[in-house]
Structures are given as C-alpha cells and as structure tokens.
Image (spheres, grey):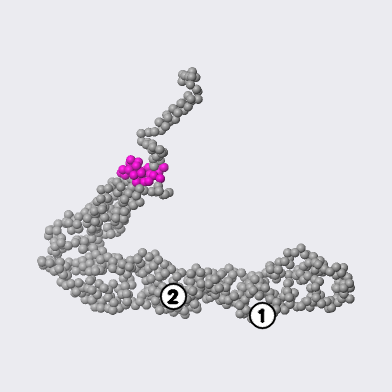
Amino acid sequence: MRYITILKNSKRPLKKSCAVLFLLFIIGVLSACVTDDTVVRQGGFTPKPCIDCHKEKQAEFRKKFVHAPVGKQECEACHIRHGKLAVKSFKERDEDKLCYLCHTQMSAKMEKTSHVHTALKQGKCIPCHSPHASDNKALLKKTGNDLCYTCHDQATFTRATKHKPLMDGCLTCHAAHGSPYKFSLVKEEVELCKTCHNFGDGAFKQAHRNYPVQNGKCMGCHTAHSSTNGKLLRESVHEPLAKGKCESCHNKPTDANPFGVAADGAKLCYTCHAKEEKSYMAAYRHRPVEEGKCLSCHSPHATDYPKVTLMGKNDLCISCHEKKAEALKMSSMHAPIKEKGCIACHNPHASENKFFLRVPEKQICLTCHSDMEKDMKEKYGHQPFVNAECTKCHDPHGSNNPKMTITSMGSLCYTCHKKEEKEFLKTYVHTPVNNRQCGLCHSPHSSNYKGLLKSPAEQLCADCHKSMLQQTDMKAVHPPFRERACDTCHNPHASDYIGVTNAPTRELCYKCHKNMESSVNSSNIKHTPVEEGKCTVCHSPHMAKIEKLLLSRPKELCLNCHEKIVTTTARKGHIDMDKGDCTSCHLSHSSESKGLLNDSDPALCLKCHAADTERLLKSHGEPVAKIGHCGACHVPHVTEKPGLLKSVTHDPFATGDCKVCHE
C-alpha cells in the first residue's frame, strides 16, 4: 500500500512508472531462470540438454563406467547438434577417426603397429566398446573371452583339450588393439611360449624327441587354443608326427642340421606316398604337383584342415586362383563349392580330364544331377544339353543370376539365337518375348514337344489365356480356336500385324475362306470393312454368342457404323429393319448392286411387295410389276412420312395427281 501511495503522490506520469515496473519484472524472471550450469550463447538460444529429449538413454548413463563426454554432458564432443541431414550425425564420418579426436595416444600407437586387431583395422571401435556407458571397465560391452566370442567362432575354443592361458583369458597372449607380432601376440611366438614352458626341461625335450624346437615355430604343430587331440596338436596331423617318427623326414636331432630333410621337395614325400606318385602320372597335373612343390598346399607337420592342407576348403585354391574368388561372392553359388569346396569337382593333384575334373567334362554334372539323364531321353533336346555342354549356359562356379546362368535369363537365349533376336524386333511382340521370358513357354533342356515347348502347343496357350476357355456359353466358335490351333492365325513370338498374327487380317482370313475371297474380288461393290481388310470389325476371331462369329446382333452391329439411320427425328421404319434383319435386303460383304443390296431395285422390293393390293394400286396408280424404280420415291430405312416416302416430294406427287405429268 505504501508503494502504491508513493506512485500516486509522484509527479512523474503514471504510464512511465508502469513501464519501469514491467521492465523490473521481466529482469527478475530471467534472473530466476539462469542457473550456474546454463550458458547463454551470445546472439543465440540457450542450448537445451540433449538428455531432455533422449530420455531413453537415462538408464544407460547410470551404469558404472561412463564415457567422459557423456558424464560432462558434452554430447557435442562427438555429435553435431543439429546434424548435417535429418539423421544422426558425427563430427567425423569414420568411427576410429571420431574416437581418435580424443584418444590421440592410441591413434599414434596404432599408426606404428604392424598387426592391428581386425575390427580396429576396419575403423571400428564399437564392436568392443560402448560409446556411452557400460558396467564393464574400459566401456567394454562384455567381459573376458565372451567379448571375443562375439566375432570369433567359439567352437574352435571349446574342444576337449584346452590351452591353459585360454582359460585365464585371451589377453594373456593377445594385445586387445594390436602389437608388433603376428596375431597381435604380446610377444614373438616362441618367446611367448617360453613364459610358461621350460624348453630345457627333460620331459619337454623327450616329448619333442630331443629336437631343438625352440629354433622353430610352436604353432607349426600345436594349436594355441583348443584341440580334439592330446598335447594340443592341431586337428589334422601328418602321420610321422602323430607316431613321433620325426626322423622319417628329418635328420637326427644330434645332426648339425637337425631339421634338414633326407630329400628335397616331392622326392621326400614319395618315399612314403609311392602309390600316389603313380596316380599323379596323368594327362593333366596340378602345377604344384608338376613342380614337386607339395608344401605349396600341405603342411609337413599339422594343420586344422583335412589332409594337412594349409587352408580350408576354397581358401587354399583361391590363394593362387584369385580370379575365382569372385565366384564365392555370387548370389547363386554352385552347391558343391558351398558344401565341399573345389575338390568336389576337381582333383587337387592330377586327372585324365581337362581342368583336373574327377570325371570327364560331359559326365561331371550328371554325378549330382542324375535326374537329367532321364531328360536326355526325351524326343527333342536343346543342343547344348544334348551335347552335355552345360557351361554354354551355366557358370560352373557361380553367378549373380538364378540357376548360375552366365548372363541374365532375358539375355541368355540370345547369346546363341542372335538371328531370332533380330526377327523379334517387330511392331507387335508376344508378352513373354517382350519380357524376355523364354522359359515361360520353352524348356531349357529337353521336351517331348516340338520347339522344346513345356507342354503341347494347344495346352500351352491356354495356360496363360485361361479366361477365353472359361467362356462356355458361346454359340459360334472359330474352328482353329476350337481345335486349339492358335498358330494357324498367330505367331508365337512377334509380328508386324496387330494381334501378333501371321499375316494382315484380310490375307489371314482368306487363307481359309477362299470362296469369300473370290466372291469379294469379283464384285463391284464391297463393304468398307471388307475392302479395308478389317474382318474383326464385325466378327470375333475366336468365339461369339451369335452365329457367324458376329460381335453383336446384326441390327446393333450395323448401326455401330451406320448410326445416321437412327440419329434422325424420323420415326416411320421399314418393317424388316425394325425386326433387326438388315441382311434381308443387304449382303454383308460384297454385291453387284449399290448399297450392297442382294438384288436390284425393284426386284428386291417385289420379293415382299409382289401382290397388287387395293392400297398399293391406289397409291401407285398401276400394278407394281410396272414400277421401274422404288427408290425414286421411297426411303429404304426410316422417314417422317407414312409409306417411307422421301421428305421432299414434287407437289403433284404429294397430292397424288400423277396424271399432271404422266399419261
């Protein structure tokens, strides 16, 4: 009240005082909103904490270990607040580069490291680390070996005999990010093994037949993780090693060169594998066999792959045959390659068959596709199939096309049928041909039907054009259609004529309707559709509910074109026309008389109006037999006047006074 009284007693204007009060109120409100941890950007908005919207992250951020920028609510250390597009956006596109913005020491270290963890080499940190928070130290997504097993197949680590360091954790032997040593080991291989194994121990020496194995490589015989064999020997062990007969190949352990061998290359192998040596004397020999380089593919001691090979399945082959590596990436890969690898079809050593095939090329496919032998006995065979030249159409390894075809199905047939491809470039093309779907009608291998058709021609068309066959209430059926002889009229591939027909419509129809052709050609007057060769204007080429394959009843059919007859105000009609029988007076195709009449005037009219009735005698003044031309006075179709008289008449004629002019 005291404050109000002061204002009342003040000499300053009241409006100015109110303005000051309002300004003080606004300043007070803004002061209350600004807290210690809120920064107002100069010339902009106060940034809102990201967590206000991303509430789903709140639970994650309460975990035991929180990424430093997250703990400080510095989301923009990694993220761009508004994004470059309407998607999540980071300061750096590459994951590792983003992390290296802060982890500079790690970046510098990895640049100098020769063996980097695969994930990190690919620029990925998140496979192992959570970017925000974790319950595990170093923001790891999982702890111990479980983290490693997210990428590495656990089966190879859980065999019967396990390496003790594996039980202690992968990081006993491996560096998490990378190291100067192969497999990211923390030390060089032999040195690492020495940390647990005493190479000078008597039992150790005896187990290794007193050979100085410290001068070799432990992993040449042993696996570092787990094995189904004792002593952690690898899964596939060379027989002399398995039996402890190292001297079968090597010099004695007391020799100056204990690891020296009794013979070079294949000569050493053939001291045991004499039987194999004979079998390799075939027409085609694999180059390593030819050159006596068995160790190009095999280990002399042990590996984790069958037959003591250096790598598994296809990996060994593509280490030399690099171009074939692409086949392993194809969407349609040959099943034997997937299941057994290259050796399913190829002998890895030698063969009497080209490409080292296990059986002759023309038989190799039938070893799996035995059902094709039955198809080869069918009446008609595709030439490549009959000649067992499967690779003319199929890639034997794989392709990105269904059925491993060498090109897309739409282009495959035309690799040989180039002539046909040109012939099909016409105005009207059968839909399967236009869509390059040859396989809809033709079998690619063999058939009992001519043209390699999948089914009899009469049935094949019906497979697609089913709706036509379902119309059973038709009174008239075109014979070729009834007999399913579609090719009588149609070309199955392409044509320059509408409806993919074999010839222009008129020519096509006249091939069967020769009498009609003669009649039309000898007539002076021709129906316009007939003259233009448009038979289907009136007739259905397949079937119809009306005789003679007419598309509609004669009256409606004729009036589709001759509409002027019924678009006048005239209401008096010729009785036969009212019945819808145009053909009582007209011929439908051709005639010697004008208007396609089936007889001359007055002979045509006298067929109906022959009797001299009292009415006719009165109106004509003489017997009808003496009338020379009915059309001189009458309209043949409709008129406004009784008696079908023409609308404009001579005055004496209108009054019936014919004798004014005629005797």
The answer to whether any part of residue 352 appears in the image is yes
Query: What residue lies at 36% left-to-right and 64% top-to-bottom?
Result: 329
The question of residue 214 being in magenta is answered with: no
Whole-percent x, y for residue 172 in the image: 22, 53
The question of residue 74 being in magenta is answered with: yes
> Residue under circle 1?
521
Chain part drawn in magenta: 53-82
Label 2 crowd (10 A; few <14 / some 14-19 / many >=20): few
Mark 1 secondary-structure assignment: helix
656 left or right of 502? right
Q: CA distance from mark 1 to mark 2?
A: 45 Å
Which amino acid type corresponds to the residue marked 1 in the rendered image? Asn
Which amino acid type corresponds to the residue marked 2 in the rendered image? Cys
User: Which mark sits nearer the N-terminus, 1 or 2?
Assistant: 2
Question: Relative to 341, is 61 above or below?
Answer: above
> Residue 188's image quarter?
bottom left
